Amino acid sequence: MRTKIKKIALFSFVAVLFAAVSCKSDDDAASNQEVNFSAENTAFAAQTDNIVEGAQNIVEGGYVQIEEPGQRMPNSIFPECTAFTITTNGNGGTILLDFGDECTLYNGAVVSGKISMEYGPLVAGTRNIDYTYLNFTYNQNGIEGGGTINRTLENSNGNPQSTVSEDITISFPGTSVTANRDGLRITEWVEGVGSGTWMDNVYHITGTWQTVLSNGFERTGEVTERLVREMTCLYFVSGRIEVNQEALTGILDFGDGTCDGFATIIFNGIEYPVLLGN
């Protein structure tokens, strides 16, 4: 059976999922419809979204810590196990974040490896930042690749904003499956700007992207209800993505604002649970 989630903590959810996918509901029976999709691949794709956003917060947090004094956070997410190497040339510079073999950030994320950033001059409050992940892991998930950030100090709402083009590859622990994600994403920093602490930071994310797994699974996604990321939580707390996969169109729903490791995917009005963590 294609619908399978290999997570011990989700036995009760999986039982419901198997029943829902293998058997038609009364409404489906009446309309002679059946939802047939891969729950495991759906989970990989949703986890990819969450991993990429968590790592991106680290990239931007590291940049802000060095190059945006008005928004710098004396109380940042970076503990002493984070080493900053900074090189400036008058028109930009480079930042290297080195987390060593293992570093637990203050928001609970466990990371290792390095992140390199290279950026040019600040022109009219905007600059481009090229970033690359170097043997980097985020909560045991490997991350390769990088992208370009067009960083704006103040958008039309007066908030810092990053428009990111990315090409990222994720490797998951305990499986040979990898995921590649490329697309365009906009992140607006809507709360906690200039407060001096990371704990009240909130971000809104919109955009479109494609996720391709090494086993041939493909999913395209477009944010239809802005995603909300709170720095005190390792997961999206709300928002929706319209997804297209396996000849199906559905909605990936990240919840009502509660910090947990679950999302819901909705096909033909039927809801299925999705685990966002390892």
Image: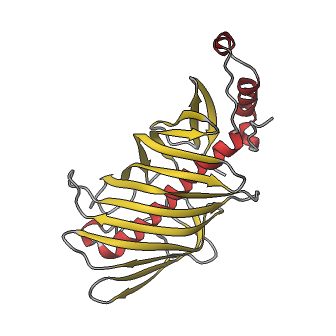
Residue drawn 38% across and 66% down? Answer: 149
Q: Where in the figure is residue 205, as x and y percent of width and height?
A: 40, 49
In-front residue for pair 251/154: 251
- Residue at horizontal 44 percent and vertical 54 percent from the top: 231
In the rendered image, is residue 234 in sight?
A: no
Classify 235 as above or below 163: above
Q: Nearer the viewer, residue 102 or 265?
A: 265
Residue 22 lies in quadrant:
top right
Q: Image quadrant for the N terminus? A: top right
* The residue positioned farthest toward the bottom in the image shown: 89
Give the quadrant of residue 122: bottom left
Q: Does residue 34 appear left or right of residue 250 in this picture?
A: right
- Residue 189 lies in quadrant: bottom left
Residue nearer the viewer, 68 or 47: 47
Up/down of 258 relative to 147, above or below = above
Residue reaching furthest to the right: 1
Q: Is residue 207 left or right of residue 182?
A: left
Residue placed at 50% from the left, 42% from the top? 259
Examine the rendering and report whether any part of residue 170 can be seen. Answer: yes
